[in-house]
Amino acid sequence: MADNSSGHEAPTRRKYMKFGGAVLGGGLLAGCAGQSDSGSTPTETEISESTTTSTSEDDSYTVSMAPAGEITFDSIPEKWATYYPGYADMGVALGLSDDLTGVGQPSEYYTEFYDAVPGVSVDSDSLTALWADGIDKEIFYELENDVHLISPENMKRSFDWSDEDLAEITENVGPFIGNRIYRRSDEWHDHRYYTMYEAFEKVAQVFQKEDQYQTFKEFHDEFIADIQSQLPAESDRPSVLLTYEASDEPETFSPYRLDDRGTNKKQWHDLGVTDALANTSVEQLSAENRSELDFENLLTIDPEVLLIRGHEEKSASEFEETVLASLQDHTVASELTAVQNGRVYRGGLLWQGPVQNLFLTEQAAQQLYPDIFGEVTADEKLFDRQRVADIINGNT
């Protein structure tokens, strides 16, 4: 990481005018120290705090989000970057993909879902990778983004940045605002969490796209309500084990607990599944825990459905022909109930936003309840792709 004496010029008048609150008001560092709403951890259903507030008679506005605190914008940001693909997807949902310059690792930004949305596409190969054995400050100077949808606390904890590093880039380039929402198992994350749509709303506030956000949310809420109205009784829902293993011939599996309310499990929460690990002592995958389960462990748990992440680049049929087939041919794995019944499926993305989540929820509903929603290998659609395209493109 570049040191603080980078030789870059001090903020131009344009930068001071554009991000006056973040540069002059100290909103970023004050927020990291506990200002604003960063101290609370609400339930999943708690309503997010109020929308943006006007700061003067001009066009400036303030967005408040833990852990950054209050960030003031004097005009709407244009160029932007993020680390986690879920935030990139939020920008796509708001029609902002053309101004996205970079993500943490483009190879982990799964954009194939957009191919099914008319008139929407993202070329992940054209995006700059923020990560290269760490995140150097120079990449932010090169991209010259107006805003970075990245948690400042995450920059410190995961990438060894200092408060001085954050202040330098905020002043010379643009502010950081975001929250690591995809999981809730990291001990350092002692400030407020957000649900996917609470964070999505914050992104909409940053770009002054609240109306578009609201339209997308209404579409999502209607879709989820329709799905949930058709679900079987809880007693008739299968027990599910969510794991990670990218190999086509897996031998061990990293487990996830479904009681973690991170956004990476949103579709499973919405579908009301029963966690096969609920009454076990197995700890879930996290930064601190990298343990794995072998087939003997899986036989003890014996879930009705086994979900394996790391294969979203495969179609449902390709997954069956590789991963499922290898388990069916395995001496021990073939004894698992899920394998015997052919109920081993792709586990969905680790990082997802609102567009991707629509597809992943459809996929999950068909995996778990094919008698109700159709087979996952079929071409049955549970939501209107054209309507999603219209919302993204502002044709509402």
Image (tube, rainbow, N blue to C red):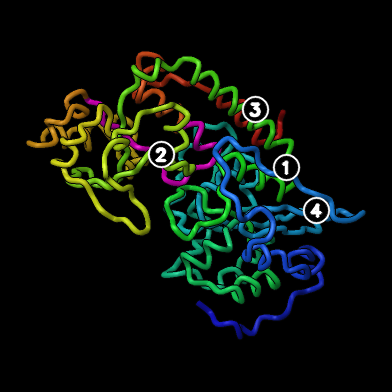
Residue 259 tag number: 2
Badge 4: how crowded within 10 Å, few (<14), some, or many (20+)?
many
Asked whether residue 190 is in view, the answer is yes
The reply to whether discs 4 and 3 touch (Cβ–Cβ < 8 Å) is no
The image shows residue 67 at horizontal and vertical percentages of 61, 58
- Which amino acid type is shown beneath numbered disc 4? Tyr
N-term-proximal mark, 1 vs 4? 4
- Which amino acid type is shown beneath numbered disc 1? Lys
Q: Name the residue under label 1.
A: 209
Could you tell me how far apart the alpha carbons at marks 1 and 4 are, in whole angstroms?
A: 13 Å
Could you tell me how far apart the alpha carbons at marks 3 and 1 are, in whole angstroms?
A: 14 Å
Q: For the residues carrying marks 4 and 2, which lies nearer the camera in this image?
A: 2
N-term-proximal mark, 4 vs 3? 4
Badge 1: how crowded within 10 Å, few (<14), some, or many (20+)?
some
Q: Give the range drawn in magenta.
A: 342-359
Residue depicted at 33% across the width and 42% down the height: 309
- Which amino acid type is shown beneath numbered disc 3? Glu
Could you tell me how far apart the alpha carbons at marks 4 and 3 are, in whole angstroms?
A: 25 Å
Q: What element carries label 4?
A: strand
The image shows residue 324 at horizontal and vertical percentages of 21, 33
In the image as oriented, which residue stretches furthest toward the left? 331
Could you tell me how far apart the alpha carbons at marks 4 and 2 are, in whole angstroms?
A: 37 Å
Residue 218 tag number: 3
Q: For the residues carrying marks 2 and 3, which lies nearer the camera in this image?
A: 2
Q: For the residues carrying marks 3 and 1, which lies nearer the camera in this image?
A: 3
Q: Mark 4 points at which residue?
A: 61
